[in-house]
Amino acid sequence: MIDDPVAAFRVEAGEVLDQVEQGLLDLGHRLDDIDLVNAVFRGLHTLKGSGAMFGFDALAGFTHHCETAFDRVRKGQVPATAALVAVILSAQDHMRALVDGDAPKAEGDAILVRLQAAIEEASGTAPAAPAAAGCAGWKVSFKLPVDAMANGTNPLMLLDELRELGDCAIVARTDAVPPLSQLVPTECHIGWDVTLVGDIKRDDIEDVFIFVMDDMELTIEPLAADGEVAAEPARIEEEPVVALQAATPDSPTARATAKAEESVRVPAGRLDALMDRVGELVIAQSRLSQLADRGQDLVLRSVSEEIERLAGELRETMMVLRMVPVGSLFSRFRRLIHDLARDTGKAIEFETEGEATEVDKTVIERLFDPMVHLIRNSCDHGLETADDRAAAGKPSAGTVRLAAHQAGGEVVITIRDDGRGINRARVRAKAEANGLIQPDQALSDHDLLQMIFAPGFSTAATVTNLSGRGVGMDVVKRTIEGLRGSIDVQSGEGEGSLIALRIPLTLAIIDGLLVRVGTGRFVIPLTAVEECIELSLEDDMRHRGRSLITLREKLVPFLRLRELFATDTRPDPFQKIVVVATPQGRVGLVVDQIIGNHQTVIKPMTALHRDATTFAGATILGDGEVALILDIAQLIALGQPHEETLRAAG
Amino acid sequence: MQPDNVPTTTVPWNQDNQLEVLVFDLGGQSFALEAVLVREILDMMHETRVPGAPPLVSHVVNFRGRIIPLANLHLAFGMTVAVTTPDSRIVVIEIDLDGEAVMIGLRTDKVHEVATFDAVTSEGAPVVGLRWRRDYVRTLVRHDDDIVVLPDLNAIFRNIDHRDIAVASIN
């Protein structure tokens, strides 16, 4: 889908580097996990190969050095050490810069020097490298999966590579080949028995199959001195995949399924265009069904119903296309935590949960910056130093835990740390010092904690490199609210803090309440709606005195949308009130008619209507007409001066 | 009020000093716009009023799933918005406003034809004798015994005064 091969390579290289980075971060915790070592090596190998192919020679060269160094780890000659992982991690950053084409060469050289030092240091502590078991040769039997050729594997190339290793006798096993009438030419049914003669290392043979090893049958047996297969280890089936699956059930299986599920890369703009077309289709379809219902033609009606069903399904599929698992967001924070741990000198464990929860792509992108800030806060201010933690009887490593789950039309993302929690007294002192609250003002615990989201608020005693510049939490809150979400904080002193972000699943769709004001139809976001009641005649009559109703012993102000929107038709005899929740409390909106629930595809308005801030956007109704979506906060703000003029007039 | 500047947007005559345009009618006066700007000509359709929007773009319509403003150019040229007749059409154009491509539906009283104008038949807007704001007119063209106005849409839409409108709609 991306025409420019270099751009395509950049995208792909970015993904490979992501995988390498994840592998390295995991490896930092499980230094002896050979599976991770292999995964990282494979990533480096791919990057080197495709880098050279697309003319990224600096990248290929640099990666080659890293690959060579890492190859020694893979072969067990050098143990993986934390220092080595850290160097490769920085090398990985340098590769990213090389891919983007703005990497100073000196930096790369410096990394290679550090790499060499790390390797030497590691090999110093290493057990003596296992002596290469020289032997007369190997008998290699392999059979590729049936669909190997469809996936781009060329068995002839594998055989050629084997030939390069040494003298080679190749016999094809054709016992599994089906009769000609049933043979599918793109399937691979042949197995090969290869007798390799010469002083060849087993690793070199395995290298030939490195990209296909997971799925294939492969046995490698040493030849006896006389050139025949040694008798004792009679055909030991080498099944690295199965063995590893038993040991670590998560990674290899996950990789296998990930491989099976193919994906196509599509520019987001095309998805948006498709979304528009689907929207048009749904509208055209609803016109068709209106026509069909009017006539007597049963055949037409059944076709129309069929199309209605298909259009509905198409729309739902379309929505799903835009959804990506939140795990892709979470994984980007692992590096952040790693760097934060290094910079703060604290040991930090990073845990995630619910990565499979899916959220609209746009939402994911806009969540990144606020979450970076929240995680920094947790690591920097929340988590204590190891000494403080020991004194408090906590494990020396602090934990930051990201979790996501879906709750109705929302996704709840929580960031929890087990640090010192929020110090109320300090928040209070700071809020008073900044004039946000009066010294003697009574505040609920919840309201006090919400103070941390006030502009210019920061309780960090010292400003650090990471956070605590006093900007941020208010920006975080604004960003989240811009996504039509909310942010909440809970904290027990000494027990850590929990920040919960509630975000709508998608920005493209909202559930709304469709109402009529005069001849116009409007959508009120359902998340804001608390209840709907009838405007009683006597409340209605008090036209000038006050616009207040009594709702469960409480006074609730109301706005007449007819007046606000300067509607020039006669009001309906029985006006309804939609009670909505606003930051300033409950407010009633008087409308002519409540039409019902409406799932709404939000369409933006053009720049020419940017100043009509009362509306968050517009939507197209089933009959093709346009309804405007109310922005409650803006509406209330606009309503205040209006009410004041009315009061002055009355 | 902005001073009546000399029109900023020039007319994109081609190398043969010609220009293909769509000629339409607003309140009895002929107007023309570059044919390359025109996306579609539609019959009148259901319009949705946007409370609080400037009168020049008081309504929106659904154009193939996109919500686009319906502009009343009549108001920019001191005319009242005409009643809809069987001849009324919406001319959908796409123009660049401050670096952003915007689709706008123009309410017209009648669409005449696609014509080719010659630069020699064009004259800058005279200093006197025009009822309209001079910066709204790029040039005048003599065509078929008629005088056709090439309006400056950028100047017109840039001059939407948002604040006045917001207050007006409330009171």
Image: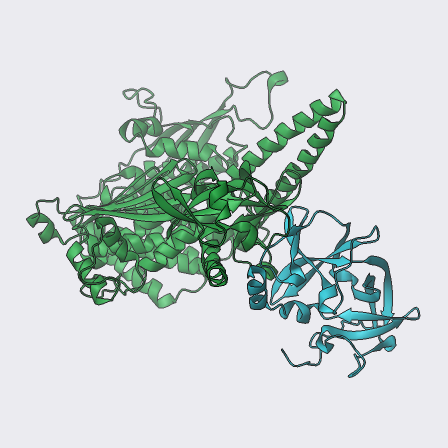
Chain colours: A green, B cyan
In the displayed structure, would residue A411 be above or below residue B47?
A: above
In the displayed structure, would residue A519 be above or below residue B50?
A: above
Closer to us: A59 or A482? A482
Closer to us: A277 or A440? A440
From the top left corner, tell me how far across and down residue A100 is, in percent: 45, 60
From the top left corner, tell me how far across and down residue A101 is, in percent: 45, 62
Viewed as shown, does residue A346 lie left or right of B96?
left
Q: Residue at x 68, y 81 (%)?
A: B5
Which quarter of the figure has residue B70?
bottom right
Q: Residue furthest right?
A: B145
Which quarter of the figure has residue B24?
bottom right
Q: Residue at x 23, y 41 (%)?
A: A30
> Is residue A565 something that shows in the picture?
yes
Closer to us: B28 or A370? B28
In the displayed structure, would residue A608 be above or below residue A548?
A: below
In the displayed structure, would residue A481 be above or below residue A622?
A: below
Viewed as shown, does residue A223 lie left or right of A125?
right
From the top left corner, tell me how far across and down residue A38 is, in percent: 33, 40
**How many discs mark residues in the rendered view?**
0
Q: Residue at x 62, y 67 (%)?
A: B160
From the top left corner, tell me how far across and down residue A109 is, in percent: 33, 64
> Is residue A497 something that shows in the picture?
no
Viewed as shown, does residue A37 lie left or right of B12?
left
